[in-house]
């Protein structure tokens, strides 16, 4: 008997148990069932239209598919040991509930075109969920940025204080990175849906006269795949998704890393809310930013998922090879990982409480204003190369004396920078931020927030 397995007629022996277990995929591909059943419904209609199914059989099949859908939705579907994959399980059950007619639905289709179609449709929906999750994190960042739009903080390069910015500007930098992620996922989704594989059959199309455009249209594809061999061999769409997902992970990890740094006693900039912190089993004082750490850790899996599929595909001859069954678990893992990580990050970001005074203190150091002094010299006609040297020497003097630029007296400043009057006014972090009034600069947080929110709106 071959129930639950869609092949076997030409064999005399039953499959070896270990070989069968190796090939079994039903425990993970079952999640594709809504898309598989949708494809089966369209296929039954097409067979009816072509006179390849009589109305009674068509009715029995559609009713059977309804029953199977209800069973799967309610997690009542009883899998049999012999169910090799979702397609096998569905046909086995369809014959149980619809009788002999259930064996007629396989005409003109192959698991090769079915699985390619199922995975594409699944991913299109998953991307919709994920962009919603990303949006929620962006909103959390935007809300924090709005509150802290004008709070001064030192901006860093090389993790060394560089120039003053605002906390709002810094937080929005993360939101803009996530905005690109949404764009990448939407691009991937467009290519996922522009090539309906059904009708490609095993690889060379089918002989029954199916109208491929009907499948595409009814399943929500924008077009039929142009080449039947490519249709069953192609997993580029899954790679594109995994690449976009890996990058989302990298962005979450970078944001998480900053939360870890900022919440350390050394920085003391921020407190993560209780609900998103954990304690230690031995050290009673501990308050650990576990969410950020876990998400940084999960990013490793996301990168692995991408590499895993690329390695599977590399060197595969056309068209379908059973290796391709390995496409699904990395994709599902990436979707699950992000659906777990994104809401946790959004929740954590919403609980962040920044210590505005400490931030202002950190931003006040005159060292971060050295560029401004040099640029003021440029305005007075000094070549930047010379200005840079002179201010550098000034900083070195301060370092030697163990003081800040702002600790120099007016007389000292006047002696060292005779071209400048009122250098003290230059050495003010607030003024330094206000001066940076370019479109992308830190003085424009409120406008950038409006721009970002307009982009949210446009994407809806
Ligand atoms: N379970 C298979 C997969 O996930 C379905 C396609 C199997 N096709 C075949 N010719 N064995 O790829």
Image (spheres, rainbow, N blue to C red):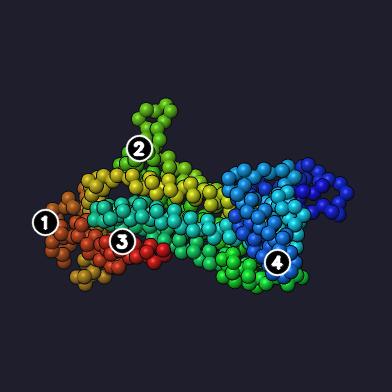
Which type of secondary structure does the marked residue at label 4 adopt?
A: helix
What is the spatial separation of the Cα atoms under label 2 and label 4, in whole angstroms?
Answer: 60 Å
Nearer the observer, disc 1 or disc 3?
A: 3
**Is label 4 in contact with label 3 (beta carbons under 8 Å)?**
no
Which type of secondary structure does the marked residue at label 1 adopt?
A: helix
Q: Badge 2 is on which residue?
A: 274
Residue 411's disc number: 1
Which type of secondary structure does the marked residue at label 3 adopt?
A: helix
Point out the tag, 1 or 3, that comes first from the N-terminus: 1
Nearer the observer, disc 2 or disc 1?
A: 2
Where residue 262 appears, as percent x and y from the top left, is: 34, 45
Q: Nearer the viewer, residue 431 or 177?
A: 177
Q: Badge 4 is on which residue?
A: 48
**Is residue 63 in sight in this rendering?**
yes
Q: Badge 3 is on which residue?
A: 449
Residue that extends furthest to the right in the rendered view of this protein: 12
Point out the tag, 4 or 1, that comes first from the N-terminus: 4
Which type of secondary structure does the marked residue at label 2 adopt?
A: helix
Mark 4, Cα crowd under 10 Å, few <14 / some 14-19 / many 20+, is some
What is the spatial separation of the Cα atoms under label 2 and label 3, in whole angstroms?
Answer: 28 Å
Ligand 1 within 8 Å of disc 2? The answer is no
What is the spatial separation of the Cα atoms under label 2 and label 1, in whole angstroms?
Answer: 51 Å
Where residue 114 appears, as percent x and y from the top left, is: 67, 60
What residue do we see at 77% from left, 54% from top?
A: 100
What is the spatial separation of the Cα atoms under label 4 and label 3, in whole angstroms?
Answer: 55 Å
What residue do we see at 76% from left, 50% from top?
A: 5
**Is label 1 in contact with label 3 (beta carbons under 8 Å)?**
no
């Amino acid at each position: 008997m071959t129930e639950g397995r869609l092949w076997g007629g030409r064999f005399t022996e039953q499959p070896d148990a270990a070989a069968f277990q190796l090939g079994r995929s039903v425990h993970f591909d079952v999640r594709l069932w809504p898309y598989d059943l949708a494809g089966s419904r369209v296929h039954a209609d097409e067979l009816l239209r072509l006179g390849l199914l009589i109305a009674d059989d068509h009715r029995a099949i559609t009713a059977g598919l309804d029953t199977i859908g209800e069973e799967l939705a309610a997690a009542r579907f009883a899998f049999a040991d012999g169910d090799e994959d979702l397609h096998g399980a569905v046909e086995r059950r369809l014959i149980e509930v619809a009788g002999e007619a259930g064996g007629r639905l396989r005409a003109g289709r192959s698991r090769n075109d079915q699985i390619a179609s199922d995975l594409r449709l699944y991913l299109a929906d998953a991307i919709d969920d994920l962009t919603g999750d990303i949006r929620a994190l962006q909103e959390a960042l935007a809300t924090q940025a709005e509150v802290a739009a004008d709070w001064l903080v030192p901006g860093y390069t090389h993790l060394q204080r560089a120039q003053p910015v605002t906390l709002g500007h810094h937080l929005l930098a993360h939101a803009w990175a996530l905005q690109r992620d949404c764009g990448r996922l939407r691009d991937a989704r467009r290519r996922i849906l522009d090539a309906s594989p059904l009708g490609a059959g095993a690889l060379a199309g089918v002989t029954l006269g199916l109208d491929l455009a009907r499948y595409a249209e009814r399943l929500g594809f924008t077009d039929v795949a142009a080449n039947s061999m490519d249709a069953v061999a192609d997993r580029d769409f899954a790679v594109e998704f995994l690449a976009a997902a890996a990058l989302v992970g990298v962005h979450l990890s970078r944001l998480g890393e900053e939360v870890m740094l900022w919440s350390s006693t050394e920085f003391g900039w921020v407190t993560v809310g209780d609900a998103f912190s954990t304690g230690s089993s031995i050290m009673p004082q501990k308050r650990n930013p576990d969410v950020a750490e876990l998400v940084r850790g999960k990013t490793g899996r996301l990168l692995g998922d991408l590499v895993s599929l690329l390695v599977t595909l590399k060197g595969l001859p056309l068209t379908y090879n059973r290796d391709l069954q390995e496409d699904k678990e990395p994709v599902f893992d990436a979707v699950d990982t992000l659906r777990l990580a994104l809401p946790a990050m959004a929740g954590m970001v919403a609980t962040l409480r920044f210590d505005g005074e400490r931030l202002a203190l950190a931003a006040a150091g005159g060292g971060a204003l050295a560029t401004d002094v040099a640029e003021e010299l440029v305005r007075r006609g000094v070549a930047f190369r010379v200005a840079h040297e002179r201010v550098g020497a000034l900083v070195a003097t301060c370092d030697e004396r163990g003081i800040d630029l702002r600790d120099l007296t007016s007389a000292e400043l006047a002696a060292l920078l005779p071209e400048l009057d009122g250098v003290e006014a230059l050495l003010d972090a607030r003024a330094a931020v206000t001066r940076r009034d370019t479109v992308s600069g830190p003085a424009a947080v409120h406008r950038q927030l409006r721009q970002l929110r307009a982009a949210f709106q446009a994407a809806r």
